[in-house]
Amino acid sequence: MLINWNTLTGNTRYTNGTFFRGALILQALFDISPEVRGIGFWINTELHEEENSKRNIRLDGLELFHFFNGKRPAYYALSFKERLYGSVAARGKDYILMENEDGYQLILLNSVNLNPKLSVSELIMKEKRKEVHVRLVGLKEGEYQVRKWQFDRDNGALYSKYWQLNSRHGLDEEILDYIVTASKPSLSVTDELISGDWSFYAYLELNAVHFYELKRTI
């Protein structure tokens, strides 16, 4: 059972919140799955930090929820992994393609290891963005509904919403509820007629995850 993690994290709330780690966590889940029988997470930040001092950031584990029940990146990373089913059709350093009875699932990753303190620099963030051209060859012909989840610091991370809505008067229950509700991966849906191959461009922010689900309709 894996309890302690060595995934990069900041040592202050600011760097810890600013440094988005979604792809790093999901990549770690893929890498260790063949070697461990179970993975442990802390339920939330409050319980994790009670083990030591609330003034310190704990670096030895990952939490699924924040103080006020907002979902942390580990929650969504785990949910994406658990959503995969079928057999592996192709796999590389920054992608995995699954084939199943309903169609296909594709995950794209932009995993970047860097000092979390650098994540506060917009210049560094721009340099670490990645543009990829994806071409899938040999897909079964037919009509597909394509669902795309985009998970990055602006789509699914609590801290960006928290920063946008914070004020010197603090946050009340209504604002916190909105942050929790709004902080989730974005979802887009398109219809595609695929005849053998399918290609597209994707633009991934630092440590972003793009999850595609291609469901055959005919």
Image (cartoon, rainbow, N blue to C red):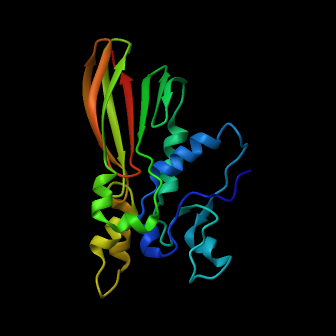
Which quadrant holds residue 119? bottom left
Q: Nearer the viewer, residue 71 or 114?
A: 114
Which quadrant holds residue 209? top left
Which quadrant holds residue 178? bottom left
Q: Position of residue 127 (x, y in %)?
A: 30, 53
Residue under the point 26% across and 33% down: 201
Residue under the point 57% across and 57% down: 7
Q: Position of residue 25 (x, y in %)?
A: 53, 51
Residue under the point 49% across and 19% down: 101
* Residue 127 to residue 49: above or below: above
- Observer able to see residue 179: no
Specify whether 98 is left or right of 167: right
Specify whether 216 is left or right of 167: right
Q: Nearer the viewer, residue 50 or 173?
A: 50
Residue at far bottom of view: 169
Name the quadrant of the C terminus. top left
Q: Position of residue 212 (x, y in %)?
A: 38, 34
Specify whether 125 is left or right of 34: left
Q: Position of residue 157 (x, y in %)?
A: 39, 60
* Residue 218 to residue 4: above or below: above
